[in-house]
Image: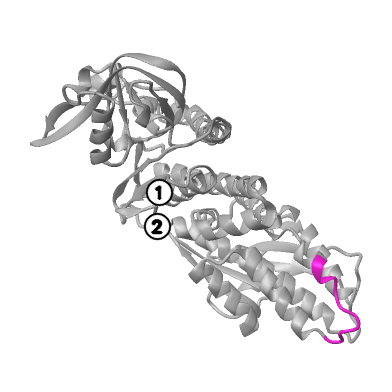
Amino acid sequence: MTPDAIIPVRRLIDERVPIRVLMEQRLVTMARDWIPREQTPDWDALRALDFEGEFLRMSEWIHGILTRDPFPADVNGLFFGFLFPPSRDLKSAVAIFLSGSRFYGNDGDWARKGEVPDDGFIDHSPLLLMAYRLIVSADVFGNARDLAIGFCHLFVSLAVAEWYCTPMRHTLRGRAPSRGLFVGLDPWMGFNIGVLEADRPGGSGSVVVSWHGAIKGGARQAEWLTSIRQIANWHELRWNEVSIWDERRLGALAKLRGSPDVPARPVIRWFDEELHGRILVSPDVIGDQAVFKKEAVRYGITLEEIEIHGQTHVLLPLKRLEVRGVDFRAFDLRGLYPGEDRMSFFLLHSDEAPFLNDRIAAIDERAFNLKAYARPVAHADWYVQSPFVHLRDYGEEWTAEFLAWLRYFFAPDFQYSHRGDPSFHYTRFLTQHEFLDERFGRETAMELGLRRLHLHFLAEAKRAAEIFET
């Protein structure tokens, strides 16, 4: 690959510049250098190509074939190659193929020692074919075909580089201890993206990710809850699929669904009701204890003080509270943190304490409180606090991407804390959301972001099952 093609790949890996931005920059360079000026490709048509949609389609194809027919663990290299039309033929397809090799890095001929298992490992790309035709059809001096091939090569290189940087890397690595990634026109002309290594179990330790904020507006809340319910269904589906074979193989579902100290709950809980009884609300729902106290005084509510581990905490008592929303058990077969493995997105409404309205919270019922908390929370009918989830070894990156997606499209004041870093990785995801929002509009950008989330969840869930087995 030429140096001007290497630079965009490095920018994606190092700076996380979106694929579409880098492809459009390549088009600007091609238009500037194109000769002759009298006959040029349709630059507007090239810029209008759906690079993001094609990237997601290719990602789903790769995830599908490597889930259905994974390479053996001793395959230590993946070669992404191309099938181009001969000469200036505009009727033949442009295709990508994937092969695996057990000889990665041994010599320059390692990729030739691989094999394509079946036709399912060949993908005909409509976008690359269209790009190829648009460029080659403007050929006068006979060099446009090389430019078209280079353009297609760059796009696939950027796609593989993106997979290298996201949870898709787990799908590509499979069960191999390490696996190299190479994108090339042949085994000698291409780009070595990098080597995927197995994550070291326990290397990063556990982490508690917490979040708080508010969702304003009835229409926005309805749209938000629909999206959350869709994501909750992904987790429930994986739990249901795995439970079948796990019950048969291990008979360990008691551990997976609860513990002696924490009552079992359904994977998904949906509330749309008014709660009654003794309700205690933690200040972390607001995120600022001073503001919480000030608002309580403003509305004439007497706070209750409790002492936990020698520190004084305040709780707000209520007799009724409207709750609407959903929580779900995050998919992790190991069941490491019963009761701390749920992702909660309940919206509050209170006439007694209007400062709680539209706030996102977690809700625990009396049966759970008796097992999980000390007095007086243990004897509350309902305990309301800031949501959090306890993770270890996997799921952190997906959680950060998920929460960043929620913040950008639904709640600008939404805050989450991950390893002491407020809004962990938000800036990285913000760049992509902003670009797609500006180019395609909020609805399309949100849907594209949701497709990415689903793809990355599938990759993480596959890895979770592998971690459990080992």
Q: Residue furthest left?
A: 310
Amino acid carrying mark 1 in the image: Tyr
State which quarter of the image contains the N terminus: bottom right
User: Magenta stretch: residue 392 in it?
Assistant: no
Amino acid carrying mark 2 in the image: Asp
Q: Quadrant of residue 425?
A: bottom left
> Which of 353/240 is in front?
353
Q: Quadrant of residue 191?
A: bottom right
Q: Which residues are magenta?
A: 35-44
Position of 3 relative to 456 (above/below): below
The disc at residue 319 is none
> Which of 48/303 is in front?
303
Picture coordinates of residue 315 (x, y %)?
A: 22, 28
Q: Quadrant of residue 199?
A: bottom left
Q: Are marks 1 and 2 in contact (CB under 8 Å)?
A: yes
Which numbered disc, 1 or 2, marks the residue closer to the eye? 1
Could one spot residue 103 in this view of the protein?
A: no
Residue underneath mark 2: 199
